[in-house]
Amino acid sequence: MLQSERLPEIITHLKKNGIPESVDAAVILGSGLGGFSSQLQKPLSIPYGDIPGFPQSTVEGHSGSLFYGMIGTRHVLAFSGRFHHYEGHPFDLTILPVHVAAALNARLLVISNAAGALNSRFSPGNLMLIDDLMQIGIPVLPAGSQHNFRYNIDDLIPLVRKTAVELGIELQQGTYCYVKGPTYETRAEIQAFKRLGADVVGMSTLPELIEAQRLGISTIGITLVTNMGTGISTVKLNHNDIREVAEIRKNDFGNLVSKLIQSY
């Protein structure tokens, strides 16, 4: 059974547990960014394991819970943890949070991730607005797609950049390159991706961004740069570094997303 076929059961369960018929916005939180849930007023949480059709999140830095609460006057969902293809999940499952957000009529979806930088002008701790996408090696085909469409957030870029300036947050902008994982990229791969025009590389986010755009949800992708790619930096990659960088930038990330939700 496709996970999307379980969507009515999932939505019924969420409503029985206090989630309203509609929300204004939803956020999918990447590694180390689950602290965003503390921005929610009057929050409630539902463990993924209690939601039919949701697997447990197994990646370090993902709590594996769905949060709901208010940011100002906005009703907001926050998915603290995602389901990666490299964990053995089909793409139909990796995009399940997007379908839940769409079923609850979210007008805005913010999708975040932690990723390594290929652009030598970037530094660990930078936040980057994803303005374009690249996929390497494995096609990501949205379930049930019947028409051609193109990833494009040009109409949202001015709002995101204006909001960052108002908050005094430096914001990079660039292309996110998706790879299957779970192994980190080799030095040769990093150089190849960089020459193709990628600015950061990661193992999530692209399937969700594509599906959200296919469904017509206004969508913003934000990357937290946690490290420099292999060969660009000699520092050995360590998952603890992701949490340390996320801890440093969690307030800026939370403030940026909260203001975007209230401004949209």
Image (cartoon, rainbow, N blue to C red):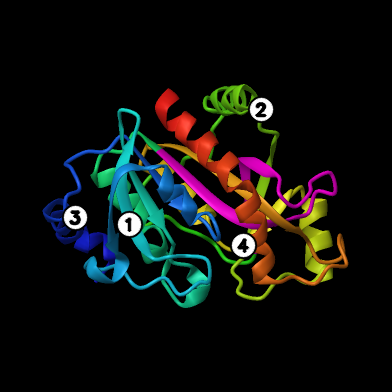
Find residue 241 and report its horizontal and vertical position in percent.
69, 65
Q: Nearer the viewer, mark 4 or mark 1?
A: 4
Find residue 119 and report its horizontal and vertical position in percent.
80, 48
Residue on which the image places disc 3: 14
Residue numbers of the magenta segment: 109-136
Residue on which the image places disc 1: 66
The reply to whether the C-beta atoms of the residues labelled 3 and 1 are less than 8 Å apart is yes
Q: Nearer the viewer, mark 1 or mark 2?
A: 2
Q: Earlier in the sequence, mark 3 or mark 2?
A: 3
Q: Is residue 166 above or below residue 82?
A: above
Residue on which the image places disc 2: 168
Q: CA distance from mark 4 to mark 2?
A: 23 Å
Q: Earlier in the sequence, mark 4 or mark 3?
A: 3
Q: CA distance from mark 3 to mark 1?
A: 10 Å
Q: CA distance from mark 1 to mark 2?
A: 30 Å
Residue that appears at 83% across and 69% down: 187
Amino acid type indicated by mark 1: Leu
Q: Main secondary structure of the magenta part?
A: strand
Report whether 256 appears left or right of 88.
right
Find residue 175 and report its horizontal and vertical position in percent.
67, 45
Q: Earlier in the sequence, mark 1 or mark 2?
A: 1
Amino acid type indicated by mark 2: Gly
Residue on which the image places disc 4: 243
